[in-house]
């Protein structure tokens, strides 16, 4: 059995960025990302609106599970605001929260994410 220094469970945005940061800060570590979903190219929801109109509770949901998580099929934007979507700003302050969101956005754009930017007012 192969051994790793770090195991990350889930290849959603949190898991992807954890692996990214670990590789950047400690490249000598061996890291594995474990994901129960299908590869991106094999993810397809069976709901077609005609024969299948609602969720049939697939064993592994192709919308929620797999590389990129639920955001893999979005238009690639994040909500860069302290107005809704979480309370990070309460722990690190509004300015630091926006800086962290901008950091994540920069990395996404560098790797093919949409470069559109719309910021809401800080709290």
Image (cartoon, rainbow, N blue to C red):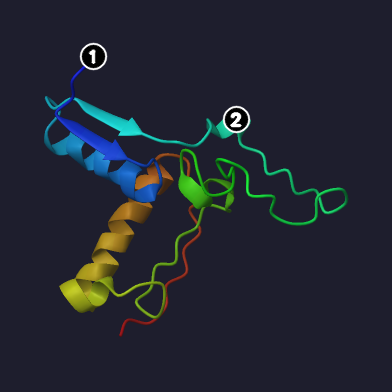
Q: Is residue 93 visible?
A: no
Question: What is the secondary structure assignment of the residue under circle 1?
Answer: loop
Check the image and report above or below for 8 versus 32.
below
Q: Earlier in the sequence, mark 1 or mark 2?
A: 1
Which residue does the numbered mark 2 point to in the structure image?
41
Marks counted in the figure total 2
Q: Cα distance, mark 1 to mark 2?
A: 28 Å
Task: Say which residue appears at 39% left-offset and 40% top-offset.
Answer: 11
Circle 2: element type: helix
* Above or below, comparing residue 105 to residue 16 in the picture: below
Q: Which residue is mark 1?
A: 1
- Left-right relation of 57 to 94: right
Identify which residue is drawn at 18% across, 24% down: 4
Residue farthest bottom in this picture: 123
Measured as percent of width and height from the top left, residue 100 is found at 25, 61
Q: Residues within 10 Å of mark 1 (few under 14, many from 20)?
A: few
Residue found farthest to the right:
50
The x and y percentages for residue 22 are 18, 38
Q: Is residue 102 above or below residue 58?
A: below
């Amino acid at each position: 059995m192969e051994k790793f220094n770090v195991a990350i469970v889930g290849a959603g945005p949190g898991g992807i960025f954890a692996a990214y940061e670990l590789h950047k800060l400690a490249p000598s570590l061996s890291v594995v990302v474990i994901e129960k979903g299908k590869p991106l190219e094999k993810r397809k929801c069976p709901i077609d609106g005609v024969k299948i109109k609602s969720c049939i509770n697939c064993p592994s949901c192709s919308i929620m599970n797999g590389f990129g998580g639920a955001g893999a099929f979005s238009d690639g934007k994040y909500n860069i605001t302290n107005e809704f979507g979480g309370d990070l700003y309460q722990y690190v302050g509004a300015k630091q929260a926006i800086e962290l969101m901008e950091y994540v956005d920069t990395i996404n754009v560098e790797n093919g994410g949409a470069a559109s930017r719309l910021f809401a007012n800080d709290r």
